[in-house]
Amino acid sequence: MKLRAEIFSYWTFDADLAKAMGGWQEFVSGSGYSVDLRAAGTGEAVAVRLVEEDGDRWLAISSTSTGELLERALGRVALEMAKNSEIHIHAVDKDA
């Protein structure tokens, strides 16, 4: 998987990202901040994960390819997180 974006937040309130994307036809599974999506037509797979390291935490959004599903997921995650907290998005392009 290629790590494509990281979202940092002040974590004012929790967000249920799995609930926000649960109705998507690409939704495979998820709970809370963890979501797995797969596009049937392209096979693109997207994973959203909460990362906790050295007292910090952030969301990592990764995909098997740079495609429409990644962009939709990144947009939905950003909007859900920004409802209650200031966020910072860092786009990266490296092997995860």
Image (cartoon, rainbow, N blue to C red):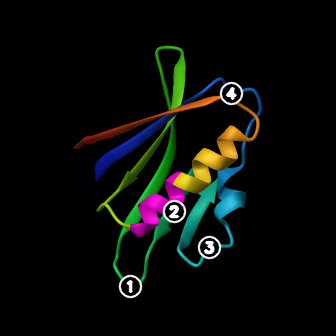
Q: How far apart are marks 1 and 4 (CA)?
A: 35 Å
Q: In this view, does 91 lie to the left or right of 57?
A: left
The residue most toward the top is 54
Q: Label 2 near label 3: C-beta < 8 Å?
A: no
The residue most toward the left is 95
Quadrant in the rendering for residue 41: bottom left
Nearest-to-viewer mark from 3 and 2: 2
Q: Is mark 2 on a helix, strand or loop?
A: helix
Q: In this view, does 59 lie to the left or right of 64?
A: right
How many discs appear? 4
Work out whether mark 3 precedes mark 2 in sequence or the reverse, and give the earlier one.
3
Residue shown at 31%/60% (left/top)?
66
Considering the whole magenta stretch, tell me its main secondary structure: helix
Q: Magenta segment, which residues?
A: 68-74
Which residue is nearer to you in this view: 58 or 68? 68
Residue 57 magenta: no
Work out whether mark 1 precedes mark 4 in sequence or the reverse, and give the earlier one.
4
The residue most toward the bottom is 41
The residue labelled by disc 3 is 24
The dot on residue 72 is 2
